[in-house]
Amino acid sequence: MTASITANTALCGIVLHPADHTRSPAMHNAAFREMGIDAVYHAFDVAPEDLETALQGARALGIRQLAVSIPHKLDVMNHLDEVDDVALAIGAVNTITFEDASLRGTNTDWQGAVRAIERETPLEGQRAVVLGAGGAARAVVYGLRNSGAHVTVLNRTVERAERVATQLGAEGVGKLEDLSGLSYDILVNTTSVGLNSDTSPVPSEVLRPNSVVMDAVYEPEQTRLLEDARAAGARIVEGKWMLVYQAAEQLRIWTGQEAPLETMAAAFDAAGQPD
Protein backbone atom coordinates (compact mmCIF):
# COMPACT_ATOMS: atom_id res chain seq x y z
CA MET A 1 0.00 0.00 0.00
CA THR A 2 1.41 3.38 -0.95
CA ALA A 3 1.33 6.48 1.22
CA SER A 4 -1.62 7.79 -0.81
CA ILE A 5 -4.41 6.03 -2.66
CA THR A 6 -4.70 6.93 -6.33
CA ALA A 7 -6.74 5.82 -9.31
CA ASN A 8 -4.07 3.18 -9.93
CA THR A 9 -4.30 1.64 -6.45
CA ALA A 10 -5.68 -1.89 -6.57
CA LEU A 11 -8.59 -2.65 -4.25
CA CYS A 12 -8.82 -5.95 -2.38
CA GLY A 13 -10.77 -6.97 0.67
CA ILE A 14 -12.83 -9.43 2.65
CA VAL A 15 -16.60 -9.93 2.75
CA LEU A 16 -18.09 -11.13 6.02
CA HIS A 17 -20.83 -10.36 8.53
CA PRO A 18 -20.34 -8.89 11.01
CA ALA A 19 -17.04 -7.25 10.08
CA ASP A 20 -15.83 -6.12 13.49
CA HIS A 21 -13.56 -9.07 14.26
CA THR A 22 -11.37 -9.55 11.19
CA ARG A 23 -7.61 -9.01 11.24
CA SER A 24 -7.24 -9.61 7.50
CA PRO A 25 -6.91 -5.91 6.55
CA ALA A 26 -4.02 -5.50 8.99
CA MET A 27 -2.20 -8.55 7.62
CA HIS A 28 -2.68 -7.80 3.93
CA ASN A 29 -1.98 -4.08 4.14
CA ALA A 30 1.25 -4.77 6.05
CA ALA A 31 2.25 -7.24 3.34
CA PHE A 32 1.42 -4.75 0.57
CA ARG A 33 3.66 -2.15 2.19
CA GLU A 34 6.61 -4.51 2.56
CA MET A 35 6.18 -5.96 -0.93
CA GLY A 36 5.89 -2.53 -2.53
CA ILE A 37 2.46 -3.29 -3.99
CA ASP A 38 0.17 -0.35 -4.75
CA ALA A 39 -2.96 -1.82 -3.22
CA VAL A 40 -5.31 -1.38 -0.29
CA TYR A 41 -7.32 -4.02 1.57
CA HIS A 42 -10.67 -3.27 3.19
CA ALA A 43 -13.25 -5.19 5.22
CA PHE A 44 -16.76 -5.16 3.73
CA ASP A 45 -19.66 -5.91 6.05
CA VAL A 46 -22.10 -7.77 3.78
CA ALA A 47 -25.32 -9.26 5.08
CA PRO A 48 -26.26 -12.66 3.58
CA GLU A 49 -29.16 -11.23 1.60
CA ASP A 50 -26.83 -8.66 0.00
CA LEU A 51 -24.06 -11.02 -1.10
CA GLU A 52 -25.01 -11.28 -4.78
CA THR A 53 -25.37 -7.50 -5.07
CA ALA A 54 -22.04 -6.98 -3.32
CA LEU A 55 -20.27 -9.29 -5.75
CA GLN A 56 -21.82 -7.52 -8.71
CA GLY A 57 -20.58 -4.23 -7.26
CA ALA A 58 -17.11 -5.66 -6.69
CA ARG A 59 -16.95 -6.75 -10.33
CA ALA A 60 -18.06 -3.30 -11.49
CA LEU A 61 -15.51 -1.56 -9.27
CA GLY A 62 -12.64 -3.65 -10.57
CA ILE A 63 -11.78 -5.23 -7.23
CA ARG A 64 -8.84 -7.60 -7.72
CA GLN A 65 -9.34 -10.15 -4.96
CA LEU A 66 -11.78 -10.85 -2.14
CA ALA A 67 -11.41 -13.12 0.83
CA VAL A 68 -14.66 -14.71 1.95
CA SER A 69 -15.45 -15.40 5.59
CA ILE A 70 -18.42 -16.39 7.75
CA PRO A 71 -21.28 -16.63 6.86
CA HIS A 72 -20.64 -16.54 3.09
CA LYS A 73 -18.23 -19.40 2.32
CA LEU A 74 -20.93 -21.76 1.12
CA ASP A 75 -23.48 -19.47 -0.52
CA VAL A 76 -20.84 -17.54 -2.45
CA MET A 77 -20.26 -20.63 -4.61
CA ASN A 78 -23.63 -19.96 -6.27
CA HIS A 79 -22.51 -16.55 -7.52
CA LEU A 80 -19.15 -17.28 -9.13
CA ASP A 81 -18.14 -17.89 -12.73
CA GLU A 82 -15.74 -20.66 -11.77
CA VAL A 83 -15.08 -22.77 -8.67
CA ASP A 84 -11.99 -24.96 -8.73
CA ASP A 85 -11.89 -28.65 -7.82
CA VAL A 86 -10.32 -28.02 -4.42
CA ALA A 87 -13.10 -25.69 -3.28
CA LEU A 88 -15.71 -28.09 -4.69
CA ALA A 89 -14.20 -30.97 -2.72
CA ILE A 90 -14.03 -28.95 0.50
CA GLY A 91 -17.47 -27.49 -0.15
CA ALA A 92 -16.51 -23.88 0.53
CA VAL A 93 -14.80 -20.89 -1.08
CA ASN A 94 -12.66 -18.48 0.93
CA THR A 95 -10.91 -16.69 -1.95
CA ILE A 96 -12.25 -14.97 -5.07
CA THR A 97 -9.79 -13.67 -7.64
CA PHE A 98 -11.13 -11.41 -10.39
CA GLU A 99 -9.54 -12.29 -13.72
CA ASP A 100 -10.73 -10.98 -17.12
CA ALA A 101 -14.06 -9.99 -15.55
CA SER A 102 -14.52 -13.55 -14.23
CA LEU A 103 -14.97 -14.40 -10.55
CA ARG A 104 -12.85 -17.45 -9.76
CA GLY A 105 -13.25 -19.18 -6.44
CA THR A 106 -10.85 -21.40 -4.53
CA ASN A 107 -10.05 -22.36 -0.95
CA THR A 108 -6.75 -21.63 0.81
CA ASP A 109 -7.84 -22.64 4.31
CA TRP A 110 -6.51 -26.17 3.79
CA GLN A 111 -3.07 -24.82 2.86
CA GLY A 112 -3.15 -22.57 5.90
CA ALA A 113 -3.79 -25.57 8.14
CA VAL A 114 -1.14 -27.75 6.50
CA ARG A 115 1.59 -25.14 6.60
CA ALA A 116 0.74 -24.22 10.18
CA ILE A 117 1.00 -27.84 11.37
CA GLU A 118 4.16 -28.36 9.33
CA ARG A 119 5.84 -25.76 11.55
CA GLU A 120 6.07 -28.62 14.06
CA THR A 121 5.88 -31.89 12.13
CA PRO A 122 5.73 -33.43 8.65
CA LEU A 123 2.33 -34.90 7.79
CA GLU A 124 3.09 -37.93 5.62
CA GLY A 125 2.01 -41.09 7.44
CA GLN A 126 0.98 -39.30 10.64
CA ARG A 127 -2.13 -40.22 12.60
CA ALA A 128 -4.32 -37.14 12.91
CA VAL A 129 -7.55 -36.48 14.78
CA VAL A 130 -9.78 -33.57 13.78
CA LEU A 131 -12.36 -32.30 16.27
CA GLY A 132 -15.46 -30.92 14.57
CA ALA A 133 -17.28 -31.44 11.29
CA GLY A 134 -17.99 -27.93 9.98
CA GLY A 135 -16.40 -25.91 7.21
CA ALA A 136 -13.05 -25.48 8.95
CA ALA A 137 -12.93 -29.20 9.69
CA ARG A 138 -13.54 -30.01 6.03
CA ALA A 139 -10.62 -27.82 4.97
CA VAL A 140 -8.32 -29.35 7.59
CA VAL A 141 -9.32 -32.92 6.71
CA TYR A 142 -8.76 -32.21 3.02
CA GLY A 143 -5.32 -30.76 3.75
CA LEU A 144 -4.27 -33.60 6.02
CA ARG A 145 -5.41 -36.29 3.58
CA ASN A 146 -3.83 -34.44 0.65
CA SER A 147 -0.55 -34.49 2.61
CA GLY A 148 -0.65 -38.22 3.32
CA ALA A 149 -1.93 -38.25 6.91
CA HIS A 150 -4.37 -40.82 8.29
CA VAL A 151 -7.39 -38.95 9.65
CA THR A 152 -10.11 -39.62 12.20
CA VAL A 153 -12.97 -37.13 12.58
CA LEU A 154 -14.62 -36.74 15.98
CA ASN A 155 -17.75 -34.68 16.43
CA ARG A 156 -20.57 -34.26 18.90
CA THR A 157 -22.92 -35.52 16.15
CA VAL A 158 -21.37 -38.65 14.63
CA GLU A 159 -23.55 -38.47 11.51
CA ARG A 160 -21.90 -35.19 10.50
CA ALA A 161 -18.47 -36.69 11.10
CA GLU A 162 -19.42 -39.63 8.90
CA ARG A 163 -20.40 -37.29 6.03
CA VAL A 164 -17.07 -35.48 6.24
CA ALA A 165 -15.14 -38.73 6.39
CA THR A 166 -16.99 -40.27 3.46
CA GLN A 167 -16.66 -37.20 1.25
CA LEU A 168 -13.01 -36.41 2.06
CA GLY A 169 -11.49 -39.83 2.68
CA ALA A 170 -10.95 -39.88 6.43
CA GLU A 171 -10.51 -43.38 7.81
CA GLY A 172 -12.31 -43.10 11.13
CA VAL A 173 -15.16 -41.30 12.90
CA GLY A 174 -16.52 -41.05 16.41
CA LYS A 175 -17.71 -38.82 19.22
CA LEU A 176 -15.47 -36.29 20.97
CA GLU A 177 -15.40 -38.61 23.98
CA ASP A 178 -13.69 -41.29 21.88
CA LEU A 179 -10.40 -39.35 21.86
CA SER A 180 -9.32 -41.03 25.09
CA GLY A 181 -9.11 -44.39 23.33
CA LEU A 182 -7.19 -43.23 20.25
CA SER A 183 -3.48 -43.09 19.52
CA TYR A 184 -2.61 -40.00 17.53
CA ASP A 185 0.32 -37.84 16.46
CA ILE A 186 -1.64 -34.70 15.58
CA LEU A 187 -4.77 -33.22 17.14
CA VAL A 188 -6.62 -30.30 15.52
CA ASN A 189 -9.58 -28.51 17.10
CA THR A 190 -11.90 -26.86 14.58
CA THR A 191 -14.86 -26.43 16.95
CA SER A 192 -15.64 -23.05 18.49
CA VAL A 193 -15.12 -24.38 22.03
CA GLY A 194 -12.57 -22.13 23.69
CA LEU A 195 -13.41 -19.03 21.65
CA ASN A 196 -13.12 -16.12 24.08
CA SER A 197 -13.57 -18.51 27.00
CA ASP A 198 -11.51 -20.65 29.36
CA THR A 199 -12.88 -23.94 28.07
CA SER A 200 -11.53 -26.88 26.08
CA PRO A 201 -13.28 -29.35 23.76
CA VAL A 202 -11.56 -32.29 25.48
CA PRO A 203 -10.39 -33.15 29.01
CA SER A 204 -6.73 -32.46 29.69
CA GLU A 205 -6.02 -36.09 30.62
CA VAL A 206 -6.60 -37.32 27.06
CA LEU A 207 -3.84 -35.11 25.64
CA ARG A 208 -0.67 -36.97 24.73
CA PRO A 209 2.97 -35.96 25.22
CA ASN A 210 5.07 -35.58 22.07
CA SER A 211 1.98 -35.00 19.93
CA VAL A 212 1.27 -31.80 17.99
CA VAL A 213 -1.88 -29.90 18.94
CA MET A 214 -3.33 -27.07 16.85
CA ASP A 215 -6.36 -25.01 17.80
CA ALA A 216 -8.10 -23.19 14.95
CA VAL A 217 -9.50 -20.83 17.59
CA TYR A 218 -7.21 -17.80 17.76
CA GLU A 219 -9.00 -15.65 20.34
CA PRO A 220 -7.40 -15.98 22.83
CA GLU A 221 -4.11 -16.95 21.22
CA GLN A 222 -3.33 -19.35 24.06
CA THR A 223 -6.57 -21.28 24.43
CA ARG A 224 -7.26 -23.67 27.29
CA LEU A 225 -6.66 -26.57 24.90
CA LEU A 226 -3.21 -25.26 23.99
CA GLU A 227 -2.31 -24.55 27.60
CA ASP A 228 -3.37 -28.07 28.61
CA ALA A 229 -1.49 -29.56 25.66
CA ARG A 230 1.72 -27.75 26.55
CA ALA A 231 1.40 -28.91 30.16
CA ALA A 232 0.98 -32.48 28.88
CA GLY A 233 4.23 -32.26 26.93
CA ALA A 234 2.76 -31.68 23.48
CA ARG A 235 3.99 -29.20 20.90
CA ILE A 236 1.42 -26.54 20.12
CA VAL A 237 0.42 -24.51 17.06
CA GLU A 238 -1.60 -21.33 17.61
CA GLY A 239 -4.63 -20.72 15.42
CA LYS A 240 -3.21 -17.48 14.09
CA TRP A 241 -0.75 -19.41 11.93
CA MET A 242 -3.53 -21.08 9.97
CA LEU A 243 -4.91 -17.62 9.20
CA VAL A 244 -1.51 -16.16 8.33
CA TYR A 245 -0.62 -18.97 5.94
CA GLN A 246 -4.01 -19.00 4.20
CA ALA A 247 -3.73 -15.24 3.71
CA ALA A 248 -0.19 -15.63 2.34
CA GLU A 249 -1.49 -18.14 -0.21
CA GLN A 250 -4.19 -15.67 -1.24
CA LEU A 251 -1.49 -13.11 -1.90
CA ARG A 252 0.54 -15.60 -3.89
CA ILE A 253 -2.46 -16.44 -6.07
CA TRP A 254 -3.03 -12.78 -6.91
CA THR A 255 0.53 -11.46 -7.18
CA GLY A 256 2.62 -14.55 -7.92
CA GLN A 257 4.95 -13.48 -5.09
CA GLU A 258 5.75 -15.04 -1.74
CA ALA A 259 4.27 -13.06 1.14
CA PRO A 260 6.30 -11.81 4.16
CA LEU A 261 5.01 -14.21 6.80
CA GLU A 262 6.60 -12.68 9.86
CA THR A 263 5.37 -9.23 8.89
CA MET A 264 1.85 -10.56 8.51
CA ALA A 265 2.05 -12.40 11.81
CA ALA A 266 3.22 -9.25 13.58
CA ALA A 267 0.37 -7.27 12.01
CA PHE A 268 -2.05 -9.98 13.12
CA ASP A 269 -0.79 -9.67 16.70
CA ALA A 270 -0.92 -5.88 16.66
CA ALA A 271 -4.50 -5.89 15.36
CA GLY A 272 -5.56 -7.88 18.41
CA GLN A 273 -4.14 -5.40 20.91
CA PRO A 274 -6.46 -2.86 22.59
CA ASP A 275 -6.20 0.71 21.30
Image: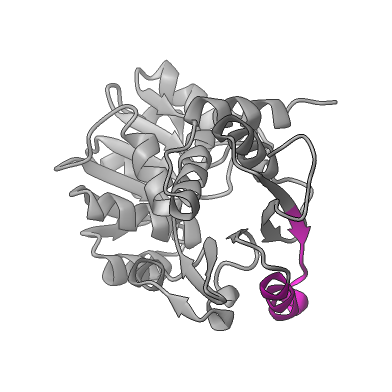
Q: Which quadrant is the C terminus positioned in?
A: top right
> By what rule are the colours in the image chosen?
one colour
What is the x, y in percent for residue 63?
66, 63
Instruction: Name which residue lies at 51% across and 81% down.
Output: 81
Residue ID at (48%, 50%): 255
Residue 271 counted in the magenta span: no
Magenta stretch? 43-60
Q: Is residue 84 or residue 90 the one in the foreground?
A: 84
Residue 24 makes an appearance in the image = yes
Quadrant of the rendered image containing residue 166: bottom left
- Residue 90 vs 223, above or below: the answer is below
Quarter-of-image position of residue 24: top right
- Of the pair 162 and 78, the residue shown nearer to us: 78
In the picture shown, does residue 76 fall above or below 208? below
Q: Which residue is drawn at 50% across and 47% down?
A: 251
Count of numbered tags: 0
The residue located at (32%, 52%) in the rendering is 143
Residue 192: % across, % down: 58, 48
Q: In which quarter of the image is the N terminus?
A: top right
Q: Residue 157 at x, y = what percent?
A: 45, 64
In the picture, measured across the screen, residue 199 lies left or right of residue 171, that is right
